[in-house]
Amino acid sequence: MMSVVALAGAVLAMTWSGDAGPRVVRVENAGLLFTDNQAGVSGVDAGYSVLMDKDTLWLFGDVFLLHPTDPEKRYVGGVSNAALLTSARTASGLRRYRFVTDPATGLARQVIPNLPGEGNETRLWPAGGWYDARARRVYLYWARIRTTGGGGPFDFRLEGHGLAAADASEPDRIRFERLKSEHGDELWWPNADGKPVFGAAVVRGPEARPRYLYVVGVEERQGKKIGKLARVAPESVAKSGAYEYFSGSPDHPTWSADPSQSADIAGLADFPSELSVAYNRYLGGYLAVHSVGIADRIRLSLADNPWGPYRQIAEIGAPHRAFEKAFCYAGKEHPELAEQGGRVIYITYVDSQRYWLQMLRVTFER
């Protein structure tokens, strides 16, 4: 599964700022992930990872389930989110993992459960997360999605984003509870009137206990996704009124309590609602990784601060199977797997036809 072979032609539109500075020199195929599971999982997307104490929690959206032992491999349904745990800190170690399952069936179960009255038309998709090691609690931003009945891959509507939390002291029993905002709403950031929503990623900084958590948001404007940024003190992460929103410029960062006053993050755009941002020691800055729309490209951009400006250092290929209607999305880095201080990183994305996480091994040179 994890054998690394050269991926010919993977570096497609290599661009960077001048001859000086970092560049991508190698992209390798590191295989499909988690296909040999015993939890009935036959396809996943999203693929966020949250580093905890001994385990890393991986989170998925819209998971299809087959009977795990039936010779016919019958389809037995789907869940709108699921998770697995792995103690791996290397890409090769990802062979060892376990899905969070329902003990009664052995099938992967939802870790953000539906509430009474919520049917299959309500989807709860995971997004960025953060682990509070002191409290042994994991916080997860999530999206509430409403299907629109068409049955196609884009027949859904985003209703908004919220925050959920779970006790992580027994990871295999993890179950997230949706937290209410100070106004009593589970959607902290409703998707209404062109307002931004937050939680697309939690920035991983260099500090073990940062002064602020930085939370990436997104606003759709004239059909384009634009990056936004919020910050909150770690001890106040569960208080919606404690969040501040970047409202200045890269040279003069200011913060507002009003999300509608949030400024665009220069250089952070074109991502389809999912991405990663993490400090990379080798590159000496914050590396943003995301799919470019639903094209077969993944963009890598670097900034001195979480609020930008981000400058593109490369676009790499995200090859898909040769189907006319295939598209690629959900590109992001998993910084806990990085090697050589960040010179080598690992990125996943999803091909709509394969519908599994595809991993790439990316090597930089500066």
Image (cartoon, rainbow, N blue to C red):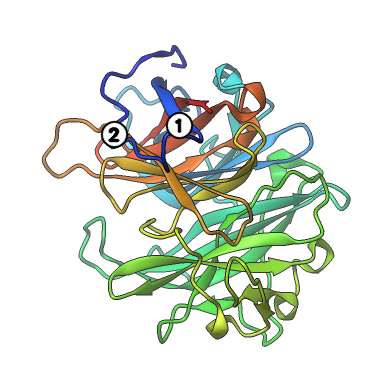
Whether residue 133 is visible: yes
Label 1 and label 2: CA atoms lie apart by 29 Å
Position of 52 relative to 233 (above/below): above
Find residue 240 and name its label.
none
Q: Given the image, on which type of amino acid does mark 2 rest?
A: Arg
Residue 274 point in image, percent of width and height: 45, 54
Q: Which element type, helix, strand or loop, lies under badge 1?
A: strand
Label 1 Cα crowd, 10 Å radius (few <14 / some 14-19 / many 20+): many
Residue 361 point in image, percent of width and height: 46, 24
Q: Which element type, helix, strand or loop, lies under badge 2?
A: loop
Which residue corresponds to mark 1? Answer: 23
Q: Is residue 77 left or right of residue 108?
A: left
Q: Given the image, on which type of amino acid does mark 1 rest?
A: Arg
Q: Residue at x 75, y 69 (%)?
A: 238
For the residues bearing labels 1 and 2, Cβ distance under 8 angstroms: no
N-term mark: 1 or 2:
1
From the image, which quarter does the N terminus lie in?
top left
User: For this rendering, which residue is in front, 39 or 290?
Assistant: 290
Q: Residue at x 62, y 85 (%)?
A: 258
In the image, farthest residue toward the right: 134
How many numbered circles are shown?
A: 2
Position of 340 relative to 223 (above/below): above
In the image, farthest residue toward the left: 324
Position of 297 relative to 243 (above/below): above
Position of 126 relative to 161 (above/below): above
Which residue corresponds to mark 2? Answer: 354
